[in-house]
Image (cartoon, grey):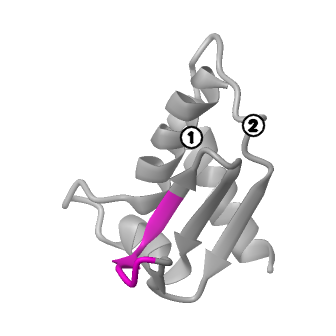
Amino acid sequence: DNRVKAFVAASAVQLTLGLEHWSLDYFDIIIIHPGDFDKSNGQRFRGETNLAGYMRLSWKSLLQGYKIRHDNINLGLHEFSHALRLNGFK
């Protein structure tokens, strides 16, 4: 779905726009779940950025982060900030 791709890309671009040096090339897989998802330990999550080279995002939470602009909660920006940091380790 192009809308999903646009929101995911917008999160990455919004976070990196204006940075002189940045890279997200370590993360080559982004999994989109319709809502919150379970991890192997049974906990519910909205997002995950994993050192195994993938990201997982809740579509519902990603949208909510852009619909509610003044609560300072944005899943896309949050997870891509993790990705920038972890990409630097690799």
Query: Residue at label 1?
Result: 83
Residue 25 is situated, as x and y percent measured from the top left of the image, at: 78, 35
Residue at left offset 57%, top offset 88%:
34
Q: Secondary structure at mark 1?
A: helix
Q: Are marks 1 and 2 in contact (CB under 8 Å)?
A: yes
Q: Establish if 62 lies above or below 59.
A: above
Q: Quadrant of residue 22?
A: top right
Quick check: 36 above or below 87?
below
Q: Where does residue 59 sit, x and y in percent of width and height? A: 55, 79
Residue hosting label 2: 26
Q: Earlier in the sequence, mark 1 or mark 2?
A: 2
In the rendered structure, which segment of residues is drawn in magenta? 41-48
In reply to whether residue 74 is colored magenta, the answer given is: no
Instruction: Looking at the picture, tell me which residue is in the foreground, 54 or 33.
Output: 54
Compute the Cα span from label 1 to label 2.
8 Å
Nearest the camera: 39 or 19? Answer: 39
- Give the camera-side residue of 1 and 84: 84
Q: Residue at x 74, y 66 (%)?
A: 5
Query: Per the image, is 42 magenta?
Result: yes
Question: Is disc 2 placed on a helix, strand or loop?
Answer: loop
- Quarter of the picture containing the C terminus is top right
Q: Amino acid at mark 2?
A: Tyr
